[in-house]
Amino acid sequence: MVTRVLLLGIFATGLTAQFIQPVGDALEGKAYLGGALLSLVGYVLYDQVKELSASVRAPSRVMVNSSELGTFVKDAFHARNVEISFLGYTGETLYNALYHRLDDLLDQAGPTRRVVIRMLVPDFGERMIVPSKVGDGDVPEDDEEFRKRMERRCREYDNILSELAERLTRAGRITVHSEYRLYPGIPRDKICIFNRELVLHGLYDLSARMRLHHLGDEYYDPKGFRTDLNVWSREGTAAAEAAVSVWNKHFDDLWSLAKQPAWRSSTVS
């Protein structure tokens, strides 16, 4: 602001000195008009630089840990229309944050009037190399029982979130829809999209292991809560905004191709 006032002051003084003789005599030099115009050009350039600087500012943070997802969920629910999409392993970390936020809405909806939650998890009904049992020579061995264990966990999360969604919708103050769908393959990428404006993306550590002492076996089991996530925001650079659009389309395409899990009733849409 001070810079703008100074530049405009120089312009006004120079312009006055060019056409009003007493003012011109009080100032030395002959290039009053040139100096005035130069100061005006400086003023215009200053505005352009300020605008450009604002348009390319980067997100305040470029990487976060999955343990911080609760903050992003809380911020997302400041909007009237909330849309949260997930692709990953079981969605446990995000599920915990969503459960507490939806539970809070039963008492205080705040500005939120519509919520859509989409959770894409692996099809644990198919043979997999991750998750799997660690075999001889660290070779992954498909383990149906372990896959069923992960499937039961996802089913539990889906049922709880869906029940909360139905209770909130019946109350009439807010409409909530929550759904799990299945994609083929291993849980490699972890993607969280908030209100189509902000994307978190990271890669699971596929070498992570867990030992089940009661079975005496070791399993390849990615730890989602340890995953670091890159931040992409529409409020960042033009490249970041383009990346957010690509991630949204990618998720939408996967969602449209994904199948509903067997545990869901055919009447659930």
Image (tube, grey):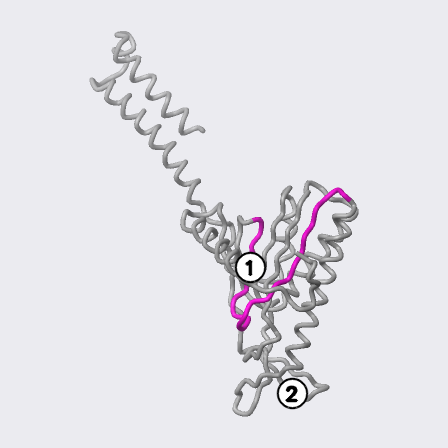
Examine the structure image and report whether residue 107 is included in the region drawn in magenta. no
The quarter in which the C terminus is drawn is bottom right
Q: Amino acid at mark 2?
A: Asp
Q: Which mark is residue 255?
A: 1
Q: Which sits in the foreground, 97 or 122?
A: 122
Decide if residue 9 is on the left or right side of residue 197: left
First in sequence: mark 1 vs mark 2: 2
> Mark 2 packing: few (<14 Cα in 10 Å), some, or many (20+)?
few
Relative to residue 52, is residue 167 depicted above or below? Answer: below
Residues at marks 1 and 2, CA–CA distance in whole angstroms: 34 Å
Task: Write down the region rendered in magenta.
Answer: 172-195
Residue 187 magenta-highlighted: yes
Location of residue 129 with respect to 245 vertically, above or below: below
Nearer to the camera, 77 or 63: 77
Q: Residue at x 41, y 36 (%)?
A: 51
As displayed, is residue 66 above or below residue 84?
below
Residue 131 pos. (x, y %):
59, 78
| In this view, 129 is above or below 255 | below
Q: Nearer the viewer, residue 88 or 56?
A: 88
At a point 57% along the width and 89% down the height, the residue shown is 135
Q: Which residue is mark 2?
A: 217
What secondary structure is the magenta-colored segment mainly?
strand
Q: Is residue 21 left or right of residue 136?
A: left
- Decide: few, some or many residues near mark 1? Use Cα within 10 Å; few <14, some 14-19, many ≥20: many
Q: Amino acid at mark 1?
A: Trp
Q: Is residue 138 left or right of residue 1?
A: right
